[in-house]
Amino acid sequence: MERFESPEALRQAAGSHLGHSAWRVVDQDQVNRFADATGDHQWIHVDLERAAAGPFGGTIAHGFLTLSMLPEMVFELLQVGGVRMVINYGLNRVRFVSPVRVGSRLRAGAELTAVEEVKGGLQATVTVTFEIDGEDKPACVAESLMRFYI
């Protein structure tokens, strides 16, 4: 984990790679609970039998399930001292590049792409790449905006 002692230290680190989170297994129970929470029960996510005969050879995670792992994984990599709160300000760009088969392991790599001043603090742009263990292409690439208020 990268621990920046101050907002100024964060600013000076713009352009650096923050490392990788721990691997996490995406299991069917997690996919089913996400389907229940979002109402997205498409068969490629929850119907084991039909999905086995489908294009991916089994069920796959929702793209938005992968994306929802971003805060936990990024906060594993990035901590800033001297701030009173951190806000998820949104996303500039998200691409779901490859399907995440249930049972796969995911981790996030993060690059601190930019840091700029905003009223009351700093806004960091963090490019997050969700890697699938054993796969060449990532599952998802997202440009996340985080605001650190001083």
Image (spheres, grey):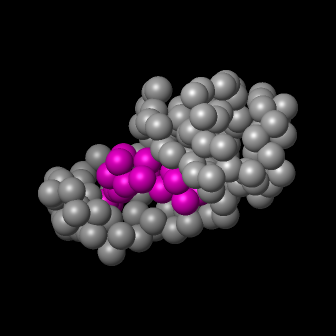
User: Residue 11's image quarter?
Assistant: top right
Main SS of the magenta part reads helix
Tell me if 114 is positioned left or right of 4 in this view. left
Q: Identify the residue shown where x is 46% and y is 27%.
A: 93
Query: In the picture provided, is 106 more to the left or to the right than 80?
Result: left
Note whether residue 145 is visible: yes
Image position, residue 138 (x, y; %): 55, 41
Q: Which corner quadrant holds the C terminus?
A: top right
Indicate yes or no whether the magenta region holds residue 72.
Answer: yes
Q: Quadrant of residue 148?
A: top right
Based on the picture, tell me whether residue 87 belongs to the magenta stretch: no
Residue closer to the observer: 58 or 120: 120
- Tell me the residue at 70%/37% (across/down): 111
Place of residue 68 in the rendered image (x, y in percent of width and height, measured from the top left)? 42, 53
Q: Residue at x 66, y 60 (%)?
A: 76
- Judge by depth and name the residue closer to the eye, 66 or 37: 37
- Above or below: residue 53 compared with residue 19: below
Q: Is residue 141 left or right of residue 150?
A: left
The percent coordinates of residue 133 (x first, y second) are 61, 56
Measured as percent of width and height from the top left, residue 104 is found at: 50, 62
Q: Which residues are magenta?
A: 58-73
Residue 82 higher or lower than 14, as above or below: below
Query: In the rendered image, is residue 132 in sight?
Result: no
